[in-house]
Image: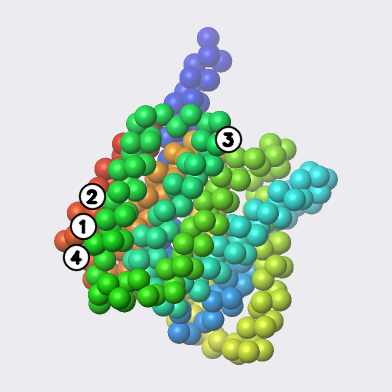
Amino acid sequence: MALALHRTTSRTTAPLLGLVLAALATVVWSGSFVTSRALHDSVPPVQQAFWRWVVALVAVAPFGARQAWRQRDVIRRHFGFVLLASLLGVAAYNTLVNQAGLTTRAADMGMIMAASPVLMAVFERVGGVRLGGRRVAGLLMACAGVVLLVGGGTARGGAADRYSVPGDLWMIAAACCFGSYSALLRRRPAQLGSTAFLFTTFLLGAAMLLPAQAVSLSVQGGFTPTSGTVLPLLYVGVASSAVAFFAWNKAVSLVGAARAGVVYYLQPVCVALLSWAVLGERVGPAQLLCMALILGGVMLGAAV
């Protein structure tokens, strides 16, 4: 009887914990869009990405290096999976976000990035996972809020400004990478520990960025280490990488990419508010209305 009660409690608390972890990762990641935009004129995009993952690797090493060494045979057997996850979630995704930050406002970066949950849900459905009517309705409701926010609720200078920014295309590519990475997490081998997986993907992702880092240093030069450059890099390395990726990966393992993806729709709301508070980017009434629609969709689709 005690065993049955424990199993029932686990089935109840696990989805709630997964949603809390997904929300934590989403809020922390929102800050990384603001820091990317804040660093756009002081640290080149590739160098932002490289040092982010170097910092993240150092932060995770005390917990993941030993586990990764013990599980080296598992990593070797599934090296293709780990390599693809490193490419999509580490090397490519963050570099594309930083590239977008050169020309795109932080609030708009968050809005476009919110399209990735649609791709997560599509991948899960193709994989045979039944999403459920409430979750689909919540996803569509939140997606409608994002579409309205991007199409009519932005506070840019005009239509020509809105659709001529190359950064939007970089952000669409970043959203595709992150959605694919999140869907891929469901295939993570059960024998591969979460911290070992993080350490290995961070290590491989940083290694993939080494050639681009060398080119950036030779062509663009390095950046000046000041509190305005080092502190944001520490934030994205420790909080947005080590902490947020651990929370997100755990959330996906508990509730699946589709349900975690619905919570991810909170990101444009968080980014818009942070960019308003930190960077002074304007948030208008139309944006607030669209944010309410997004929050309603999150509450409907993420219901346990």
Question: As shown in the figure, which amino acid type bears the numbered disc 4?
Answer: Gly
Label 3 with label 4: CB-CB less than 8 Å = no
Query: What residue is shown at x 53% (from left), y 68% (from top)?
Result: 96
Using the numbered discs, state the Cα–Cα distance from disc 3 to disc 2 in whole angstroms: 31 Å
**Residue 5 in the image: above or below residue 40:** above
Q: Which mark is residue 288?
A: 1
Q: Which of marks 1 and 3 precedes in the sequence?
A: 3
- Specify the farthest residue to the left: 285
Q: Which mark is residue 127?
A: 3
Using the numbered discs, state the Cα–Cα distance from disc 4 to disc 2 in whole angstroms: 13 Å
Q: Which mark is residue 292?
A: 2
Label 1 with label 4: CB-CB less than 8 Å = yes
Using the numbered discs, state the Cα–Cα distance from disc 1 to disc 2 in whole angstroms: 6 Å
Q: Position of residue 69 (x, y in %)?
A: 79, 51
Using the numbered discs, state the Cα–Cα distance from disc 3 to disc 4 in whole angstroms: 40 Å
* Mark whose residue sits in front, 3 or 1: 3
